[in-house]
């Protein structure tokens, strides 16, 4: 949480209050809010410089209110400078704004982190204007070229290791503190405070478990895939920046293995971990896991002879999951009703009929038409077309 330079705002005096002032009545003009006294350009420059000083240079997106200023379509490295130059050219950047998101990608040994910098121009008095959320996944727990049984066994082995999970939490905590220190040196006058990392597991629903009948292992395993054109609604599990920008077809399976081992084998029950539903609602803490009754505790089986995941018949088969349908309707996706066609960005984030303003750059930093640029990107497994 970062407190940026700001000033308490006052409302305008009404005609009636102006008349009352003539008789000595002093109106209360306090609004209970404070506004930034630094520009969006200054904030962006400070954030890019600060993160660059701790070797975080991979920009993902820059969104200002309803306008996508920059988005990395190709998952390129070291493109924070491109994002900054793109913002400089954009007519939509630098004007008054309500909320700005600057998102970065960062990889460390065993840990993949999405860094979402959210800046609000107006907040309640005493609240911080900037919130930086680090959302991480343990890359050691991504599915690899292995059988489903080997994967399940590997995750179970990791859970039995002492200090494995808490060690990664310490790594993320250290990264958070380095970012806070770097911001303090690059943005004079700020106050930053760090919140300890929270370790959360998601308990998958029956519908999510049903889709696991179709996950593939062995050579067909696909790693988490970057979503260059994500959905705009960030609620529930989509509020997690990693889930928002990456699609991992094995995430629900991993979640089931972790929660099941916690409940049935009493692993990680001594750690400060919380289990939520997909919408982010708290279900139980790890310390209470042994008393939890879960209907789907034995819904999945793994076989050494069969590479497929076996899901209990009691879990209704809903067909092969559609990554787009899983995340709900989006103004970003203009496919035909049957799911075909190219996805062109042309609707506003505010779900209005006005065009969405997008500025992007090619390798040579040349502005291109948004429809031409996005429709030229080929489809890839685990990614949205467009």
Image (cartoon, grey):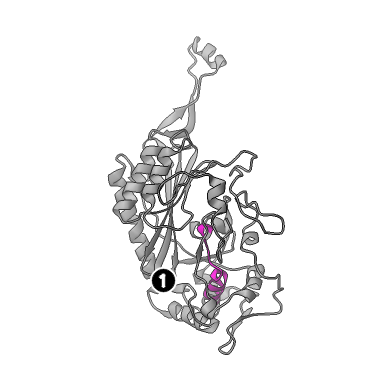
Secondary structure under the numbered disc 1 in the rendered image: helix
Q: Residues within 10 Å of mark 1 (few under 14, many from 20)?
A: some
Q: Is residue 180 visible?
A: no
Q: Residue at x 56, y 73 (%)?
A: 253
Left or right: residue 19 versus residue 182 is right
Residue matched to label 1 = 165
Left or right: residue 48 versus residue 216 is: left
Residue at 50% across, 83% down: 150
- Is residue 141 among what the camera can see? yes
Q: Is residue 129 above or below residue 59?
A: above
Q: Residue furthest left?
A: 185
- Could you tell me residue 211's position as x and y percent? 64, 71
Q: In this picture, which residue range is highlighted in magenta?
A: 244-260
Which of the 4 image quadrants contains residue 134? bottom left
Can you say whether 322 is above or below 146 in the image? above
- Quadrant of the rendering where the C terminus is positioned: bottom right
> 158 left or right of 190?
right
Residue shown at 62% from the left, 60% from the top: 324
104 versus 307 height, above or below = above
Of residue 106 and residue 336, the one placed in the foreground of this image is: 336
């Amino acid at each position: 949480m970062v407190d940026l330079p700001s000033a308490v705002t006052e409302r305008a005096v009404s005609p009636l209050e102006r008349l009352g002032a003539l008789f000595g009545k002093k109106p209360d003009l306090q609004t209970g809010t404070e506004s930034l006294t630094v520009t969006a350009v200054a904030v962006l420059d400070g954030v890019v410089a600060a993160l660059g000083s701790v070797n975080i240079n991979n920009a993902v997106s820059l969104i200002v209110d309803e306008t996508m200023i920059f988005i990395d379509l190709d998952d390129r490295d070291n493109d924070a400078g491109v994002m900054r130059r793109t913002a400089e050219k954009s007519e939509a950047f630098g004007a008054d704004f309500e909320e700005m998101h600057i998102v970065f990608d960062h990889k460390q040994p065993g840990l993949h982190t999405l860094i979402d910098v959210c800046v609000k121009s107006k907040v309640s008095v005493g609240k911080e204007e900037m919130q930086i959320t680090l959302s991480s996944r343990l890359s050691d727990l991504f599915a690899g070229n292995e059988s489903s049984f080997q994967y399940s066994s590997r995750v179970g082995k990791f859970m039995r290791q002492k200090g494995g999970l808490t060690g990664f939490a310490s790594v993320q905590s250290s990264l958070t503190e380095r970012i806070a220190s770097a911001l303090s040196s690059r943005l004079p006058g700020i106050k930053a405070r760090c919140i300890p990392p929270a370790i959360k597991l998601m308990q998958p629903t029956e519908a999510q478990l049903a889709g696991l009948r179709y996950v593939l292992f062995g050579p067909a395993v696909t790693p988490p895939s970057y979503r260059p054109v994500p959905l705009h609604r960030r609620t529930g599990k989509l509020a997690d920046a990693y889930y928002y920008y990456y699609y991992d077809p094995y995430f629900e399976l991993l979640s089931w293995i972790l929660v099941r081992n916690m409940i049935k084998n009493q692993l990680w029950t001594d750690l400060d971990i919380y289990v939520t539903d997909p919408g982010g609602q708290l279900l139980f803490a790890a310390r209470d896991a042994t008393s939890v009754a879960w209907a789907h505790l034995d819904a999945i089986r793994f076989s050494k002879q069969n590479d497929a995941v076996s899901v209990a018949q009691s879990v209704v088969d809903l067909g092969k999951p559609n990554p787009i349908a899983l995340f709900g309707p989006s103004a970003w996706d203009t496919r035909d009703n049957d799911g075909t066609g190219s996805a062109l960005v042309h609707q506003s984030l505010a779900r209005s009929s006005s065009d969405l303003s997008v500025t992007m750059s090619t390798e040579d930093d040349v502005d291109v038409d948004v429809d031409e640029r996005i429709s030229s990107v080929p489809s890839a497994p685990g990614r949205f077309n467009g």
